[in-house]
Amino acid sequence: MEIKSAYYPQYLAEKVYNIPSEHMREMIDEFAINAKFYMSSDVDNEATDKINAAVVDLLKNKFRYLPLSLVAEAYTRGSLGELGGTTRFTVRNIYIWLTAVDEKNQRLSQESQSRIDSERRAAEEKAFRLQQKRSTKYGAAMYWKIGFAKQLSSAEYHRISLDKIVAMMDRGYKLENLTPDMIP
């Protein structure tokens, strides 16, 4: 059913603690009307007012980090029997519904954080492997240069930098086929 409160679209993505209590109460009143309709509940208006006041208190204290969209989902899915509880419109049932969507929200948040952590670890591992590969190339270039140390004059030896050798390796030259005169 449609929520007629002017505040609903404004606060849909907001967490409960950011919503003023009087605005929250107006929206909870509408959620309750819809839920009572879905449940074919005959709870009178006085009892509904007490229930709604207790629910607003629950939301502001226990479920303050839930977004309003999940509170609305709890009322809709709970009143349709998807989230457990009994067939009566009570604070206890609403608490069960809110707990169910809160657990879902926490699970989704943990899965999202886990995915972010996995992506970060994969990126760090890739960077480490690239660095390790680069270090291995410099080590191989150092051994190659040392191997030619006795055959080269001091000036020629110092002219050949490790960066130049690694650049040649990056271009596809294999060290065993590389000679000092090939190094620019």
Image: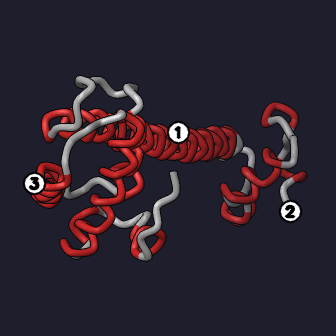
Label number found at residue 122: 1
Looking at marks 3 and 2 on the same chain, the residue that comes earlier in the sequence is marked by 3
Residues under labels 3 and 2: Cα distance? Answer: 87 Å
From the top left corner, tell me how far across and down residue 73 is, in percent: 41, 45
Q: Residue at x 23, y 66 (%)?
A: 25
Tag 1 secondary structure: helix
Tag 2 secondary structure: loop
Relative side of 89 to 143, left or right = left
Q: Which residue is mark 2?
A: 184
Mark 1 vs mark 2: give the one in front. 1
Quadrant in the picture for residue 172: top right
Mark 3 vs mark 2: give the one in front. 3
Q: Residue at x 23, y 37 (%)?
A: 89
Residue type beneath disc 2: Pro
Q: Is residue 12 visible?
A: yes
Relative side of 121 to 46, left or right = right
**Between residues 135 and 41, which one lies in front from this camera angle?**
41
Looking at marks 3 and 1 on the same chain, the residue that comes earlier in the sequence is marked by 3
Categorize mark 1 by other alpha carbons within 10 Å: few (<14), some (14-19), many (20+): few
Q: Which residue is mark 3?
A: 50
**Between residues 142 and 158, which one lies in front from this camera angle?**
142
Residue type beneath disc 1: Ala
Relative side of 46 to 19, left or right = left
Q: Residue at x 22, y 30 (%)?
A: 88
Mark 3 vs mark 1: give the one in front. 3
